Amino acid sequence: MNILVYFLFALSGFAGLIYEGSWARYLKLFLGHSSYGQVLTLCIYMGGLAIGSFVAGKMVVRTKRPLLGYGIVELAIGIGGVAYHPLYLWLTGIFYDSEWTASLTPRGAEIAKVVLATGSTLPIAIAVGMTFPFIAAGLMRKSGAEVSLPMLYFTNSLGSAIGILATSYLLIPEIGNHATLCVAASINFLLAAIFSFIGLATSPVPPKGDDAPEVHDEDYVAEHKLAMPPKTTWFWIAAITGLTSFVYEIVWIRLLSLLLGSSSHSFDQMLSAFILGLSLGSAVSGKLLKKDSLVVLSMAQIFMAFFALCTLYFHQPFWGMMNEANQIFNPTSDGYICWSLFKYALSMLWMIPTSFFAGMTLPLITLILTRAFKSEAPIGKVYGWNTLGSIIGSAGGGLLLLPILQLKGALVTAALLDFAIGFILLVIYRKRFRYSVMFYIMVCVMVMPAIFVKFDPSLITSGVFRSYKNMHPNEKIQVIDGKTATISFHESPVHYYVKTNGKADASMSKDRKSPISSDELTQAATAFMPMAVKTEPYDAAMVGFGSGMGAHYLLADPLLKDFDCVEIEQAMMDLAKGFYPWNYRGYDDPRIHIFIDDATTFFHTNRRQYDMIISVPSNPWVSGVAGLFAHEFYAKMRRYMKPGALWVQWIQTYEFNDLMFLNILKALDTVFPYVSLYKSTDEPDIIMIASDQPVLQKGIGRFSTDTALVAEFNRIHRDPEFFGERNFLFTNKMVKSLLDGVKPNSLFIPIVDNKAEEARFVHSEAHIVNVFDSCEVCWQQYLDPEDYALRRPARVKAMLAEPKDEFKKTALLTYVDELIAAKTTADSLVADSATADSIQPEDPRLAALESSVGYQKFRENYIEWIRTIPLEARDSDEVYIKVSEAVNAGALPRSFADEFNIMDAARQGVYKQAALLIADFFDRYEMNDMGDIFLRNCIVIALLAGEPELANIVYENAIQKNEDFFAVEKRLIEREIQQARRNK
């Protein structure tokens, strides 16, 4: 029976960590940052355990059927699990819809958030905390054996370690947060039914008196009459060891975020590894019950502290192993699985040596007190005091110790507390240690290196989780461990850049005489692209300061009246001063107001609306960031936008994929009727501008006339129209067929948060930019011709302004002149030798020409040349005119002429004729040998001509299995063909 109980209690732990993992996701959405969400979740979870343990500890001594009581508690937990999601929505709705909360100060609003979050979560956590005293009392009464205590700790913790991984990798990615809570509740209901049956079927055992079962295990301390501290001292020890354990966890979560990456999966792996160590320590402590419990506990405290310090002493090999892993694991889906297992192994290697000894402490303290009191009453108290210390450790470690003492200081402080407990207990209560020189030497050897060793800043901020790095570059580095993240500023010989938890978030070249590029170009785009839409004075807000360059460029606009910038991490504001003076407006301009706050709290309490809000968060694979790309977030933020206001969103296409991109675009589409997407020229980034009105850059003309803006573009060495409609990709209306059936990224079904880390690892890309940017006859012309007609002139102008290769032009003209001359000579010879009624033979010269190296080179160069010339301007291009003459003269191979004639008909807008030529081309040649741009042209021309069947023939025979076309475009083609068939 005991084995069954242990297994079922493991299931209880499994369900408990489902709750904790799910709550962390809910609360980080509400609080606005993953670090705050994790700290608050730990505090509420551990606080609930403490309260529940205290309450159950009082109740269990008066309960005749503790296993029945346990079943009732599991039932209550299950009901709470089912009710949590609607309760969360109701309470958060109260916050966001209440005029009272909107009138609060930012700090008051944060307190209100904490109160509401606690109110939704704490009751269930209390019920979870009541489980251990009830089941421990029931099992001890049944078996009369103290060994059941460590086994219960072990099985419950083991189930917890597995539960958090299952939540992270299986449940939430597949079914979402709400359904995951229902899974946990189902487990609770099952346990409630089983233990209610066991409790009713077991004869009630009086909790005290002569009928209480005897403890058969040998008490070494009592037998040898060894000194022990007062009973109350053990409660304080339980609290302190809980405090230090969670300070370690908070510090390690930050450190391992720098090592493993700060994704949600990484956090869950860390938590699982920590709990696994606790479970193993609990299991081993059961084997030591017949030893001197004070000595065992004291040595556990000392070794816990020592192994915690070892993570400081030996952190370099961990970064080295992760760096080498980039060379070992292939960037594939299978490689990602192996890499995830490797990450988990590193987490275990880092955490388990310490958490193993931490796991021994609680069962041993419980054992000492149950023997001292000769009662079950201390079980709840010990558990409660330990969790109370855990609350202080998690909150104090994250919000006070880490920012004040930084990583090393916080870690060493907690380790010294553990050393002190073990050292004092042994020296005071065991004389053989008091006079042991070797003992003092051992303690010194363990502690002294902490004075000299520190975390290597260049190493820990290197970002080895992302790619293979030079971990000791020639750089100057400043590091600040903030409340929410570790921020580092780097100065290399050629550029400056800032990192968040080891991930580069913004950079700037030191060369200020060349055109701006790289990250700075994208930051400028987030300012200038929406700025070009504005023609009247406006006010704006920005979510995320970063390097401050985006704010700096937006403040260059004389039309900007007032600018609020919300940054959650003060350390970012401090270190971004490294970009000064190039970002001087972000600090000095009187129009900007900086707020260190969570975005949703700030906007709710600020009680104003804006003409423009710019959101420039980190990459979506970073834990908590994906929530800033969710439709619920967009819906909340739209409340703070005036009619006609712009929502500006940055998103990357690298380390991403098309489906997640569409998930985010769908989220925007559900909230805003108009969304226009622009590429950040020369960078793999996209700027999305959403509004309740059509988005067009009507104000870009002032970039060339306003003296302040002209001066700014001169400083950055870019053309005033560089950020204009030339960069337009598509609107949400154009891709309705692509978005049909796509789920919007949601806070509660976090598609992007769960899949983004794998996309980052496999180096996938969102290829949708290629679909709309690599074309001659473009998709936009078919999908929304009226909208595209307004934007196309800017693209044409930009293409014509691009410098041309004059040597290539000369070579092309010379080669075509030679072909025409050769054709003229050949025709005259044929004419001289032919009779009036003879049949002209096919020119064998053209067949030989087509296979020649010179022609192949000409064709390649011509394609490169002509695709830089827009269709609208080709009839005035010298090369195009000359090639047209050669085609008409029959001087070029027929395959070339047929391809040329298709595009010439498209140039003239006679799509029916072009479609007929495509059909003829399909009959003559193997179209799957053609390039992707030509095939894309054929599909769009066929649809423009109203010939969906021709488009389908080309698709099925030349594109469907063509690896040059990505799934997103194949999906678009299929859906547009279906739509064209319905409309025909």
Image (cartoon, grey):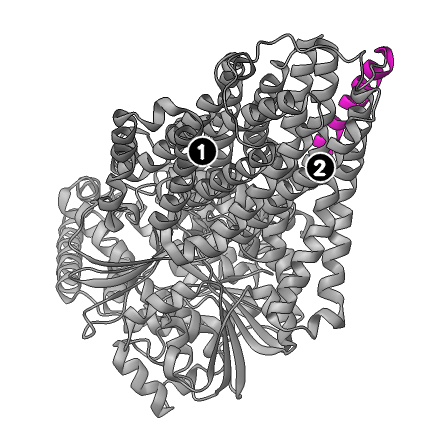
Prevalent SS, magenta region: helix
Q: Are marks 1 and 2 in contact (CB under 8 Å)?
A: no
Identify whether 462 is placed above or below 536.
Answer: above
Q: Is residue 983 visible?
A: yes
How would you rate the neighbour count of disc 2 (Cα within 10 Å): few for under 14, some for 14-19, many for 20 or more?
A: many
Query: Which residue position is annotated with label 2?
Result: 54
Q: Quadrant of residue 514?
A: bottom left
The structure residue drawn at horizontal position 58% and vertical position 45%, both measured from the top left corner, is 391
Mark 2 residue type: Phe
Q: Is residue 954 visible?
A: no
Q: Point out the stretch of residues depicted in magenta.
A: 181-203
Identify whether 315 is placed above or below 140.
Answer: below
Compare residues 744 and 298 and report the one nearer the observer: 298
The structure residue drawn at horizontal position 81% and vertical position 11%, both measured from the top left corner, is 211
Query: Which residue position is annotated with label 1?
Result: 961
Q: Position of residue 522 (x, y in %)?
A: 37, 65
Q: Position of residue 748 (x, y in %)?
A: 65, 46
* Nearer to us: label 1 or label 2: 2
User: How far apart are labels 1 and 2 at the CA level?
Assistant: 66 Å
